């Protein structure tokens, strides 16, 4: 399946995704889980974890036992990060649960000490390497649907969840809970459109070239 490349929506800003971008991302994650083979069934839950509110790097630290599916209710235990993001419990909606349920049978092939979706290539866990792996998985999905632009990052999915929660599902306190941030000030900073330094430098360079200075 080939999709057109979409134009960036903002000039040099890191921002949360908006709802239609999430719909497009969800469609691709669903296709991965249904027809993407074993690799797709592993990549789709990485998206689902971010869609639920996890930072991409957090997904690499989850274990199979951190997924709780109890009847109609299902949750993820998000481990948090050393700085800035607290551990928390995240509810799964039906879509996120479906992606994870499609992947769970593949866990039978994993070692009992394995992480949930992170496939480590070395025996000792290194967060930086793991984080790069998770970001790469999400970025490949973003590229597949034409959303891999410099005005967003892999975490734009995560920040969309916090923004959506603040707007539609309980206000600032609920958004704090889902994001793991410690204060409304931190949450606001996370959701604010931030200038992309690389793009800003390029804009200044072009202005100098066109002005002759």
Image (cartoon, rainbow, N blue to C red):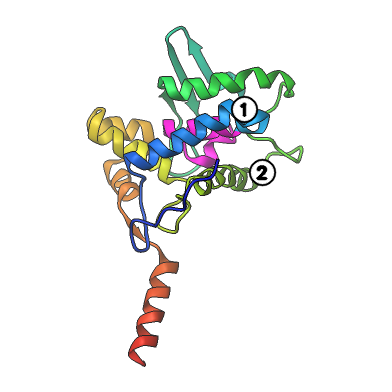
Name the main secondary structure of what is drawn in magenta. Answer: helix
* Depicted 137 relative to depicted 200: above or below: above
Badge 1: few (under 14), some or many (20 or more) residues near its Cα, within 10 Å? many
Looking at the rendered structure, the secondary structure element under dot 1 is: loop
Give the residue at x 42% y 19%.
94
Q: Nearer the viewer, residue 152 or 190?
A: 152
Q: Can residue 182 be seen in this snapshot? A: no
x%, y% of residue 57? 54, 41
Instruction: Say which mark, if any, is on residue 126.
Output: 2
Instruction: Say which mark, if any, is on residue 116.
Output: 1
Residue range of the region highlighted in magenta in the rendering: 43-62
x%, y% of residue 89? 43, 24
Magenta stretch containing residue 46, yes or no?
yes
Give the residue at x 49% y 24%.
77
Q: Is residue 212 left or right of residue 135?
A: left
- In which quadrant of the rendered image does the N terminus lie? top right
* Depicted 84 relative to depicted 48: above or below: below
Badge 2: few (under 14), some or many (20 or more) residues near its Cα, within 10 Å? few
């Amino acid at each position: 399946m080939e999709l057109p490349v979409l134009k960036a929506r903002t000039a040099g800003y890191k921002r949360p995704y908006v709802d239609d971008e999430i719909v497009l991302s969800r469609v691709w994650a669903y296709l991965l889980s249904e027809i993407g083979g074993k690799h797709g069934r592993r990549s789709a839950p990485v998206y689902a974890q971010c869609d639920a509110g996890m930072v991409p790097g957090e997904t690499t630290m989850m274990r199979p036992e951190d997924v709780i599916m109890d009847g109609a209710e299902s949750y993820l235990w998000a481990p948090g990060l050393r700085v800035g993001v607290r551990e928390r419990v995240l509810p799964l909606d039906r879509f996120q649960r479906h992606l994870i349920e499609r992947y769970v049978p593949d866990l039978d092939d994993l070692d009992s000490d394995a992480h949930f979706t992170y496939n480590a290539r070395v025996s000792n866990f290194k967060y930086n390497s793991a984080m790069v792996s998770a970001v790469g998985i999400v970025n490949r999905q973003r590229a597949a649907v034409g959303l891999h632009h410099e005005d967003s990052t892999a975490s734009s999915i995560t920040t969309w969840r916090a923004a959506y929660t603040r707007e539609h599902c309980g206000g600032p306190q609920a958004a704090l809970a889902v994001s793991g941030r410690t204060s409304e000030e931190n949450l606001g900073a996370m959701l604010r459109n931030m200038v992309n330094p690389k793009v800003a430098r390029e804009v200044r360079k072009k202005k100098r070239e066109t002005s002759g200075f």
